[in-house]
Image (tube, grey):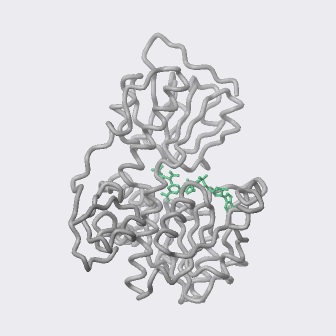
Amino acid sequence: MNTKPIEKQQRLKIVADENIPALNPLFTELGEVHSVAGRDLQRDQLVDADLLLVRSITRVDRALLEGTTVRFVGTATIGTDHIDQQALADLGIAFSSAPGCNADAVVEYVLSVLLHLAEEQSFCLKDRVVGIVGVGNVGSRLQARLEQLGVSVRLCDPPRQQDATADQAAAFCSLSQLLEEADIVTLHTPLTRQGAYPTHHLINADNLSLLRANAILINAGRGPVIDNQALLTCSLQRPDLTLVLDVWEQEPRVTPELAARVRIATPHIAGYSLEGKLRGTWMLYQAYCHFARRAMNCTFEALLPPAEVTEMCLSAQAGLLPAVRMLYDPYRDDRALRATLALPAEQQRLAFDQLRKQYPVRREFSSLTLRLSEAQHTDFKALGFPVTHQ
Ligand SMILES: NC(=O)C1=CN([C@@H]2O[C@H](COP(=O)(O)OP(=O)(O)OC[C@H]3O[C@@H](n4cnc5c(N)ncnc54)[C@H](O)[C@@H]3O)[C@@H](O)[C@H]2O)C=CC1
Ligand SMILES: O=C(O)C(=O)[C@H](O)COP(=O)(O)O
């Protein structure tokens, strides 16, 4: 890629999505930050801009950038399906995303969902098989925590399987085998439409029928990885299925008919821990400083405020759910989303974005040290909590 660091005497012009946190402490030392509404960003807002910082709702392509002065684009997200990286390379614009920035938040969303459903449906997670589709930053961290808890997993990741040694490849199975064997299926692939293993409509009318009786299906990746129309049809015929959707094919539009069939419905917030969001911005700051060959003046630790509650003592009888619920209850987000679903379609779309913009502070499990009896240590540690003796 023919990208040169920006050489400019005057301060940089940085155009950034208004929903990116910590722009001030990180980027105002570099230049003047202009906040914009990410979903509606237009070319004319990029006049004289040097940097463009976005989140997942801005389509960044040739039409937006050709002929502009932008030399560096960053997305403070894991997913990159909204970025035409080939166009950026062709235009000589440097690009960075934030791989893994909010992976722990997504893992904790899934764990919290599973512990809530286990209580409601009276099952023990350790007796269930969890199928993880997409075993990258999110999927592999989820695998690690589940296996430490003693839960059996099935893994499907053809790109990783293809690159693995014969020994490593044996850990993976096909998608159909996973759907047939797992009681719980959770999707963590990127959204891709091309290449050897595209994920658009990876879950569709043909393979939904493979799901086991009473299966739980979770999508916290990207909405179009599941054919939502096929899912609706299937769910009407299969009331035994439990669906959990954080992402939606027509996002920010959520069709009330599908939401009515979904047990836990949330507005694309699985990755919205404070740590995940701040790490996303900080990784862009790090990437830009590297690109511009500048020294960094802020560490991630300095950016992250202390949690309001840092320690909690649990009784020797306490199970996992109360501690998890202290930090994250997915039904809070489910109720907030459902309250918007009776609105006319356009207002519902705006409400979806508002829920995300005004998202309450949510901290990761690592922020809360638990005082526990010795017997409780293993499971709470496996979930990701720091633990200490009572
Ligand atoms: N709901 C939310 O708030 C969030 C959603 N995400 C989504 O989750 C996705 C995954 O995140 P990471 O694990 O960090 O990404 P990653 O890039 O580390 O891992 C993705 C994995 O999926 C695998 N994969 C690709 N095509 C596949 C296929 N056809 N079948 C099975 N596996 C396939 C890849 O080989 C890779 O190992 C992101 O791309 C993003 O779209 C990420 C963060 C937050
Ligand atoms: O990191 C990703 O990928 C995500 O899906 C983000 O959590 C989405 O957040 P926004 O960029 O849409 O605020």
**Residue at x-position 40% and y-position 30%:** 34
Where's the N terminus, which quadrant? top right
- Up/down of 29 relative to 116, above or below: above
Point out residue 321 in the picture as x, y percentages from the top left corner. Answer: 33, 74
- 100 or 312: nearer the viewer: 312
Q: Position of residue 35 (x, y in %)?
A: 40, 35
Split into 4 quadrants, where in the image is the C terminus?
bottom left
Farthest residue in the top direction? 9
Q: Quadrant of ligand 1?
A: bottom right
From the viewer's perspective, is residue 322 above or below residue 311?
below
Q: Is residue 296 left or right of residue 7?
A: left
- Give me the residue at 38% from left, 60% from top: 351
Image vertical order of residue 201 relative to residue 33, above or below: below
* Residue 145 as seen in the image, left or right of residue 199: left
> In the picture, residue 346 is in which quadrant?
bottom left
User: Residue 296: x, y in percent?
Assistant: 42, 26
Q: Is residue 165 left or right of residue 120?
A: right
